[in-house]
Image (cartoon, helix red, strand yellow):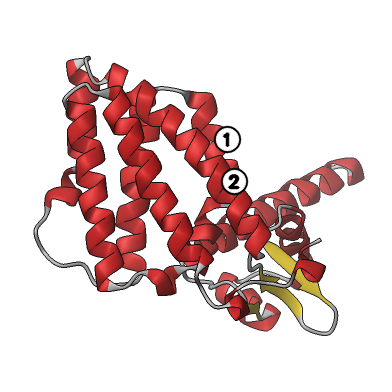
C-alpha cells in the first residue's frame, strides 16, 4: 500500500474508533449509565473500550460540542447538567412537538397495521405491576413516547426529537420518580393511549399536554442544587 493509502486507511480506522466511542458514551448517557454531573475517567474508558486516548478525547470533545458533556480544566469530561432555564425551555419544546406527534399519530391509527404496531409498542403501560423508581421506568416512559412519534409517521419529527437533549431532561430529574409520580405518569399514559385508540385526537392532545405540564411543574420544584448555574450554562 502507498504512503497515501496508509494515511487514508489510518484516518478511516481512527474515524471508526471515534464513532464507536461516540455511540458508547452517548448511549451510556441516554440509558442512565452515566449520570448528569458524573466525571468520565479517561483511563477507565480507554481500558474498557480498548482504545487510545487520541480517539477518546476527539469523541469527548464532539460530545461537548453537542452539549452532552462539558470539558472542565483539570477535571476533564463531565456529563452536563441542565440549568433551570434550559429545563423549562426543553419542556416547552417537548410539549409542542409531542402534541403535534399525538395528533398525527391518532389519525394514522386508522390504518390496521399502524394500530397493531402501536398497541404492541405500548403494551407495557397496561401491566398492573407497581413500578420501582429508576432506569427501568425511565426506559418504559421513553418507549411509550417513542411509540407515539413512530406511529405519527413523521420522520423529520423523529429526527428533531432525537437531536434534542430530552434524555438529559429525564435522567437529570430521575429523583422526581417517586412511586406517586410514577403512578400518575402511568395513568396519564393510559389516558393518552385510550384517546388515541378511540380516534379522539383533541382529547389525546389535551391528555398529552396535561401530562407534560405536570412533569414540568414537578421538575421545576426540584432543589436548586440539582441544576447547573446560569453563569456556567451560558
Furthest-top residue in this view: 111
The dot on residue 160 is 1
Give me the residue at 31% from left, 39% from top. 207
Is residue 59 or residue 153 the one in the foreground?
Answer: 153
Label disc, if present, on residue 211 of the rendered structure: none
Name above or below for residue 73 compared with residue 63.
below
Q: Is residue 228 left or right of residue 120?
A: right
Q: Secondary structure at mark 1?
A: helix
Residue 49, x across and y down, in percent = 58, 70
**Rendering coords of residue 44 (x, y %):** 61, 81
**Residue 111 visible to the viewer:** yes
Give neighbour class at mark 2: few <14, some 14-19, many 20+ (Cα, 10 Å). some
Depth check: give the residue in front, 110 or 206.
Answer: 206
Q: Quadrant of the N terminus?
A: top right
Query: Looking at the image, can residue 117 be seen?
Result: no
The answer to whether 36 is drawn above or below residue 15 in the figure is below
Q: How many marks?
A: 2
Is 37 situated left or right of 147 in this image?
Answer: right
Say which quarter of the image contains residue 156.
Answer: top right
State yes or no: discs 1 and 2 in contact (Cβ < 8 Å): yes
Q: Residue at x 30, y 62 (%)?
A: 137
- SS class of the residue under badge 2? loop
Residue found at x 74% / y 46%: 12
Quadrant for the C terminus, please.
Answer: bottom right
Residue positioned 29% across, 32% down in the render:
204
Q: Is residue 25 left or right of residue 183?
A: right
Quarter occupied by residue 86: bottom right
> Residue tagged by mark 2?
164
Question: Could you tell me residue 191's position as x and y percent?
Answer: 21, 41
Amino acid at each position: 500500500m502507498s504512503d497515501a493509502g496508509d494515511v487514508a486507511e489510518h484516518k478511516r480506522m481512527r474515524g471508526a474508533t471515534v464513532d464507536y466511542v461516540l455511540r458508547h458514551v452517548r448511549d451510556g448517557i441516554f440509558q442512565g449509565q452515566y449520570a448528569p454531573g458524573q466525571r468520565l475517567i479517561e483511563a477507565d474508558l480507554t481500558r474498557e473500550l480498548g482504545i487510545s486516548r487520541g480517539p477518546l478525547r476527539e469523541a469527548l470533545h464532539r460530545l461537548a460540542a453537542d452539549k452532552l458533556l462539558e470539558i472542565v480544566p483539570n477535571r476533564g469530561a463531565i456529563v452536563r447538567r441542565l440549568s433551570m432555564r434550559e429545563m423549562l425551555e426543553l419542556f416547552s419544546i417537548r410539549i409542542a412537538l409531542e402534541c403535534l406527534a399525538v395528533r398525527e399519530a391518532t389519525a394514522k391509527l386508522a390504518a390496521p397495521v399502524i394500530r397493531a404496531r402501536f398497541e404492541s409498542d405500548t403494551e407495557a403501560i397496561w401491566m398492573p405491576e407497581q413500578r420501582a423508581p429508576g432506569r427501568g421506568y425511565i426506559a418504559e416512559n421513553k418507549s411509550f413516547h417513542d411509540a407515539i412519534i413512530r406511529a405519527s409517521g413523521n420522520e423529520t419529527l423523529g429526527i428533531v426529537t432525537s437531536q434534542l437533549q430530552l434524555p438529559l431532561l429525564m435522567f437529570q430529574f430521575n429523583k422526581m420518580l417517586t412511586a406517586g409520580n410514577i403512578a400518575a405518569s402511568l395513568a396519564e399514559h393510559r389516558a393518552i393511549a385510550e384517546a388515541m385508540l378511540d380516534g379522539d385526537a383533541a382529547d389525546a392532545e389535551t391528555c398529552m399536554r396535561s401530562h407534560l405540564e405536570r412533569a414540568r411543574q414537578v421538575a421545576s420544584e426540584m432543589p436548586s442544587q440539582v441544576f447547573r448555574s446560569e453563569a456556567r450554562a451560558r
